[in-house]
Image (cartoon, rainbow, N blue to C red):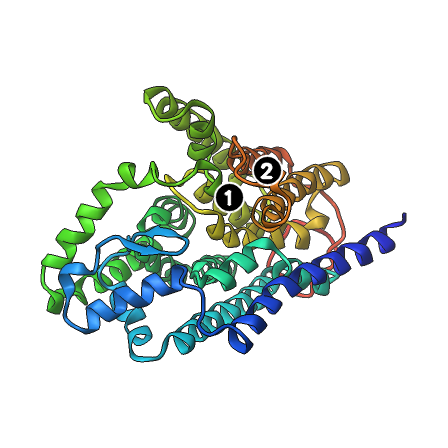
Amino acid sequence: MNARAAKRMAHGVLILHATFWILWLDYTFGWAPSPVGRDWYALREVAKSFVAGDWASVYSDRVVNSGTLFFRYPPFVLYLIAPLATVPPMVAYALVCVIQFAAAISIIRLLFRIQRPKEPQLIIAAVFGSAAMCHVIVSGQNSALLALVIAAAGVSLAFGRNVLAGACIGLLVCKPNWLPVFGLFVLWRGGIRAGAAAALTGAALVVSTLPLGIGLWRQFFAVTTRAGEIATQYLPYKEITFLAAVRSILGFGMLTNVLWGLGIAILAVFVIRAVRDARPIGRSIALVTLLAVVANPYASFYDGFVLVVPGMLWYAHRNAYSDRAWWIVGVWIAAYWLWDMAVFYYSQHISRFADPRVSAAGILLSGWIVSEALARPAKDVPCFADLPVDRPCTT
């Protein structure tokens, strides 16, 4: 099979998978009496409590047909989700889906500004045919917005707009567990002004909650301190972090925490050394995004949508790799893609894929980090991008 035939086959497979969530939406809005109560439904219930003035129940556990869900966002996020409480359930679900769909399109457009690949249609098919896209749409999750913030910060850094990059990273206080890695990177790459912009953005969001009083913040911190207890209610394979991978093997305990800390420290060293190389900024953004996922204390499978950022940048920067390095990284990406697809797509129909014992995602993503970090930038290779953002390469 030649390369052209392989690409056509990959394109067809991805398009086929994209039909899954399209059919789901067709069923939901055409045949189902009401949308399934998943993550979006829990957000709407929280919004209803907030709008109704029942603030004492905002951070209460929510039981839906997919399990117990927890509102773990800071109080200023309530402003963003409040509109969900003012419309019927079907409209609320549609609103969430449309926003995530628009965010996915915006991510592609933004990252193409850093480096546009030769075959953009394959990238588009990969994004919309991924299991992660299905998770976001079917569950009514907000991971596409998270990925959009990361992509916007990356593009801003690539074009030297460091203050804007810092402001984008500051928005991650909405999901504080994503902030440390990106915050340190934007400070390192963008300097004091970028760090100040991130801090001011976060501070502005906190100050916006003054009319709400201190009670909601107390509830938020109470939920935050329950992170360990809440984590025990999630099966490890449903998370994509290195911690979940270790926990799926060793369970909870001091040894798990030690190995987690040691593993993240080693991966961080790989990333820091790689980012200091004379490699394109797009590849640095990809590495930092991967580290932010793997080092996270908790990141669910639907948060895997942020991996479209490193995935797109990897494919677009083929000219910045040796052939061997490019294929090695590609194997890690393919392995993760197949894991995600098998466990969260096919498990509904093939029982052997359901509830795996070991959480492989964190291991596969760690392998991706190491392979990417060791793939030194290729020298004296031709450029094919139509924008002069990333170098080194020759024309």
Q: Quadrant of residue 277?
A: top right
Give the answer, above or below, for where 21 lies relative to 277.
below
| Quadrant occupied by the C terminus | bottom right
Q: Nearer the viewer, residue 318 or 303?
A: 303
Image coordinates for residue 156, horizontal then vertical, percent: 47, 62
Local secondary structure at mark 2: helix
In the rendered structure, which amino acid carries the disc numbered 1?
Leu
Image coordinates for residue 204, horizontal then vertical, percent: 22, 64
Local secondary structure at mark 1: helix
Tag 1 and tag 2, C-beta contact below 8 Å = yes
Give the answer, above or below, for where 285 lies relative to 75.
above
Mark number, residue 368: 2
The residue that mark 1 highlights is 290
Q: Is residue 31 left or right of residue 149?
A: right
Q: Nearer the viewer, residue 163 or 87?
A: 87
Q: Quadrant of residue 83?
A: bottom left
Give the answer, above or below, for where 200 lies relative to 301.
below
In the rendered structure, which amino acid carries the disc numbered 2?
Trp
Q: Tell me the crowding category of disc 1: few under 14, some 14 to 19, or many 20 or more residues within 10 angstroms, Cα based.
A: many
Image coordinates for residue 2, horizontal then vertical, percent: 89, 49
